[in-house]
Image (cartoon, helix red, strand yellow):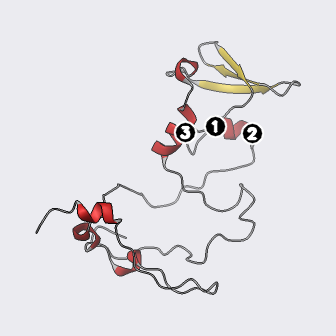
Amino acid sequence: MDEKMHELVTLRADGPGPDSTDPTHGEHAVSRITLRKILLAGLGDLVHFDKEFVRYESHMDGTVTAIFADGTTATGDILIGADGSRSRVRAQLLPAATVTDIPAVGCAGKLMLTEQTLRWLPSSLTTRKKTSSGLARTSFSPPSSVAAKTPPR
């Protein structure tokens, strides 16, 4: 949608495409805030920030060592490359994978859905159309706990 809520692009409503179980195919939307919380949960002082990742080395015992620009290293059982679309981890692991730049810019935000803010959205964002799998058209409503907090008009 553009700033006037005109539809620019429609994503498939019938679910993932072919080979959706293969992580190298399809689209995978992730909340960065949620991913960060999950990845950092319970790690405390084990995570160090302000390091520039250069490369990694895999070892015969199954461990992996991350090598940083300042010469320091960190060895562990797993290396998670959550460093964005131009990931150095991904570039080393999948050197043939490319990033395709598109002539578009995305901007997103989160807004609490209340009875008032729900009226701002076009019906195409608040209903589901019947698909070949038999998904019925349903209206979206904010949870009753949210609706109860809606200020009076």
- Are discs 2 and 1 less than 8 Å apart at CB? yes
What residue is drawn where x is 69% and y is 40%? 91
- 122 or 5: which is nearer to us? 122
Residue type (three-letter) at the residue carrying disc 2? Leu
What residue is drawn where x is 87% and y is 24%? 61
Number of other residues with Cα within 10 Å of mark 1, as a class: few under 14, some 14 to 19, many 20 or more: few
Name which quarter of the figure residue 121 lies in.
Answer: bottom left
121 w.r.t. 49: above or below? below
141 w.r.t. 31: above or below? below
Q: Which mark is residue 81?
A: 1
**Which quadrant would the N terminus be assigned to in this image?**
bottom left
Relative to 53, 19 lies left or right: right
Q: Residue furthest top?
A: 71
Element type at mark 1: loop
- Sequence-earlier tag: 2 or 3: 3
Relative to 145, 34 lies left or right: right
Number of other residues with Cα within 10 Å of mark 3, as a class: few under 14, some 14 to 19, many 20 or more: few
Q: Nearer the viewer, mark 2 or mark 3?
A: 3
85 w.r.t. 64: above or below? below
Q: Position of residue 85 (x, y in %)?
A: 57, 45
Residue that numbered label 2 is attached to: 93
Q: Residue furthest left?
A: 153
- 85 or 147: which is nearer to us? 147
Residue that numbered label 3 is attached to: 38
Work out how far the residue at label 1 is from the one at label 3, CA to CA, in angstroms: 14 Å
Q: Nearer the viewer, mark 1 or mark 3?
A: 3
- Sequence-earlier tag: 1 or 3: 3
- Are discs 2 and 3 less than 8 Å apart at CB? no
For the image, the number of numbered tags is 3
Element type at mark 2: helix
